[in-house]
């Protein structure tokens, strides 16, 4: 593989893959995993890698880390309750959008009820956490006029997957 000229067998190599292309990410992870007997690597990928199955045998032992603004802890009691209700009612498992929608609706509806029309000044409050911490900050694209363009969640979680086991990185 062409990557070997960039790897050092005496140290841990961190490979940062800045591509949103899932096929590229899979190919890179498989290639580095095939070299794991000689080279120790940690792969850092993009949020789109959240949908990739890293528990495949060809990726055994490979440490893969990526960022995401949402992390749904599978051990959380509310998460388990929602999953159970979904299995009972819909005979399927809820997607991450179910959790995101539930959390966003609950949190921002509560803030809207609390603050009314002055919500924009209070949107970054840490109240009403359901699954995730948020760090919502205003974004000003034109620094001269300081006109508010939108709000953005600046909080990221880093997820590490090894052999299908998922952990958060602090």
Image (cartoon, rainbow, N blue to C red):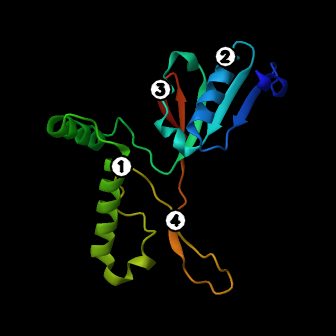
Report x, y in % for residue 120: 43, 78
Residue at (80% x, 22% y) in the render: 4
Q: CA distance from mark 1 to mark 2?
A: 34 Å
Query: In the rendered view of the protein, which quadrant contains the N terminus?
Result: top right
Residue at (51% x, 27% y) in the render: 54
The answer to whether residue 149 is visible is: yes
SS class, disc 4? strand
Query: In the rendered view of the protein, which quadrant contains the C terminus?
Result: top right
How crowded pointer 3 is (Cα within 10 Å; few <14, some 14-19, many 20+) is rated as few
Q: CA distance from mark 2 to mark 3?
A: 20 Å
Q: CA distance from mark 2 to mark 4?
A: 39 Å
**Residue located beneath label 2 in the image:** 34
The answer to whether residue 158 is visible is: no
Mark 2 or mark 4: name the one nearer the start of the chain: 2
**Residue located beneath label 4 in the image:** 152
The residue closer to the viewer here, 70 or 31, is 31
Answer left or right for 34 relative to 91. Answer: right
Report x, y in % for residue 156: 54, 51
Q: Nearer the viewer, mark 2 or mark 4?
A: 2
Which picture quadrant has residue 108? bottom left
Disc number placed over residue 97 in the picture, else none: 1
Disc number placed over residue 165 in the picture, else none: 3
Are the residues flagged by discs 3 and 1 in contact, CB closer than 8 Å?
Answer: no
Mark 4 or mark 3: name the one nearer the start of the chain: 4
SS class, disc 2? helix
How crowded pointer 2 is (Cα within 10 Å; few <14, some 14-19, many 20+) is rated as some
Report x, y in % for residue 82: 24, 42
């Amino acid at each position: 593989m062409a990557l070997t000229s960039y790897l050092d067998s005496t140290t841990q190599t961190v490979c940062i893959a800045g591509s949103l292309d899932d096929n590229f990410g899979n190919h890179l992870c498989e290639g580095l995993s095939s070299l794991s007997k000689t080279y120790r690597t940690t792969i850092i990928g993009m949020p789109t890698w959240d949908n990739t199955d890293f528990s495949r045998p060809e990726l055994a032992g490979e440490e893969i880390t990526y960022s995401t603004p949402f992390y749904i802890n599978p051990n959380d009691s509310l998460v388990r309750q929602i999953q159970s209700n979904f299995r009972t009612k819909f005979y399927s498992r809820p997607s991450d959008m179910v959790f995101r929608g539930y959390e966003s609706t609950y949190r921002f509806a509560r803030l809207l009820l609390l603050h009314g029309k002055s919500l924009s000044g209070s949107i970054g409050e840490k109240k009403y956490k359901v699954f995730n911490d948020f760090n919502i900050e205003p974004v000003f694209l034109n620094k001269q006029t300081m006109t508010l363009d939108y709000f953005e969640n600046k909080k990221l979680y880093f997820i590490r997957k090894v052999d299908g086991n998922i952990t958060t990185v602090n």
